Image (cartoon, rainbow, N blue to C red):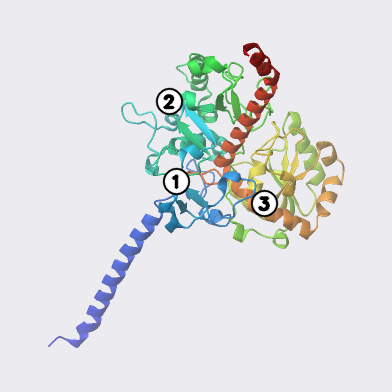
Amino acid sequence: MADKSMLPSRFFICLIAVAMCLLVFSSTFLFRLNDNSFMPGGLESVDDYNSSEYFISDLRQSVSQTAETDTITPFSKKTEISDELVPQITDVPRTVSLGYDEVKVCDPTRAILRVYMYDLPPEFHFGLLGWKGGPGQLWPDVSKTSQIPRYPGGLNLQHSIAYWLILDLLSSNSEEVQRPCSAIRVQNANDADIIFVPFLSSLSYNRFSKPTRKKRVSINRMLQDKLVRFLKDQDEWKRSGGKNHLIVAHHPNSMVSARRELGSARFVLADFGRYSKQIANLEKDVIAPYQHVIKTTPANISAPFEDRPILVYFQGAIYRKDGGAIRHELYYLLKDEKDVHFSFGSVRANGIRQAGRGMASSKFCLNIAGDTPSSNRLFDAIATHCVPVIISDDIELPYEDVLDYSEFCIFIRATDAVRKGYLLRLLRGIDQDKWTKMWNRLKETAKHFEYQFPSRPGDAVDMIWGVISRKLSSSYNEVYRKNRYNKTKLLLKTS
């Protein structure tokens, strides 16, 4: 007969075994759920904002709160056809719910933009991130997120636009990556609406603009010179004079040595602050949002009016040149106000995290011109649903042809802002109802400023392709208008 004192021990052993089985099962389940990440491997979680390992905050929570389709994005509409009908209707692609919006498996014939991308050597793109492919391999396999090289963090990240666009184009030909059908990569330049130049020019400037001891010329300058020679040797460039090429030069100092040589191309920029009108202008070029560096505030925990004790928030460099001189004037006007936070700040000493908390606790966030008309501060404010107050007379804003910023931003001329008492009197005059209306609109539109992989309907990547498509359509319309009478004359001559 078994000793009765042994029964509890056996019971506990069985209980522990069952618990271990449940733990293994749940871990496997969670691992499989996590395999469909919105970000490349290693880009999801952020704890240390000042670490060199800082990349992108986890957007899953905020993404789930912005699932409504925005009316300004015609290419993000949901299909109303049920799943069981899809096999019988071959022209309607099956939709897949991934928590942001319904994403269609891409049908190439429905793309609004056909893009030919040069197969440049890795030294111009992922090689700058330390990526080394196999023999003859120019691109990583983007269907496997673990193979996608990560973009460096900190302030490098704010100008990472080319990185996201390249990833999106590479994934457009993969059946394993589900994304919007806004742009698709074609293999023949003759089939393309535009030709994309895959150069991480902002990273090249940030990381490689200083000459090494062994070389008099920096890697950044060398790459720009090589790029100019390459492009001007291409038949595609010669046929159009470069007018149908797209180059991302988001950092204001990127492409400095090459921009004049390549000025006929279309640029994706942060603003026009350091460009002449002959090289860059709103007629041909695209303004893209910065990648915000402050963590996104999920809409469901965004603090309302009464829970934001700070009226006005600004933290950053106060003494700037050119148009940014207004910053120190405002500093002396506002620094002693009890409900105003206006101070110097940097990314050091946990600065980004502190700024994120400050913005999320403020009703209004100042976006004041610095050395250039734009700054990342505007997009940090949008990410924290702090109503932006834009004091920058020459600023150009992303997708302003379809997005009315006056619904969620306040615009003040620089000459008015420095009038004693004007700024605070205006902001204190905005009551809770008016502020809340802007706050709600901020939460609705915040998704348009999120960069992610794979891209989602209405996010920053999707919106940028839409702007480019509309720019091209406008250019084609102008060409057709100019040719109206010429074509009629030609018709009469041949009749």
Distance from the alpha carbon under mark 2 to that under mark 3: 39 Å
SS of the residue under disc 3: helix
- Disc 2 crowd, CA 10 A, few/some/many (<14, 14-19, 20+): few
Name the spot of residue 277 as percent of width and height, x first.
Answer: 70, 22
Name the spot of residue 468 as percent of width and height, x first.
Answer: 59, 33
The mark lying in front, picked from 1 and 2, is 1
SS of the residue under disc 1: loop
Q: Circle 3 sits on which residue?
A: 442
- Disc 1 crowd, CA 10 A, few/some/many (<14, 14-19, 20+): many
Quadrant location, the C terminus: top right
Residue drawn at x 25%, y 75% is 14
Circles 2 and 3: CB atoms closer than 8 Å: no
Name the spot of residue 304 as percent of width and height, x first.
Answer: 69, 60
The mark lying in front, picked from 1 and 3, is 1
Q: Residue 488, can we see it? A: yes
Q: Circle 2 sits on which residue?
A: 119
Residue farthest to the left, as pictured: 1
SS of the residue under disc 2: loop
Q: Is residue 432 above or below residue 201?
A: below
Q: Circle 1 sits on which residue?
A: 178
Residue drawn at x 56%, y 36% is 465
- Type of amino acid at the residue the image marks with label 2: Asp
**Number of numbered tags placed on the structure image:** 3
Distance from the alpha carbon under mark 1 to that under mark 2: 23 Å
- Type of amino acid at the residue the image marks with label 1: Gln
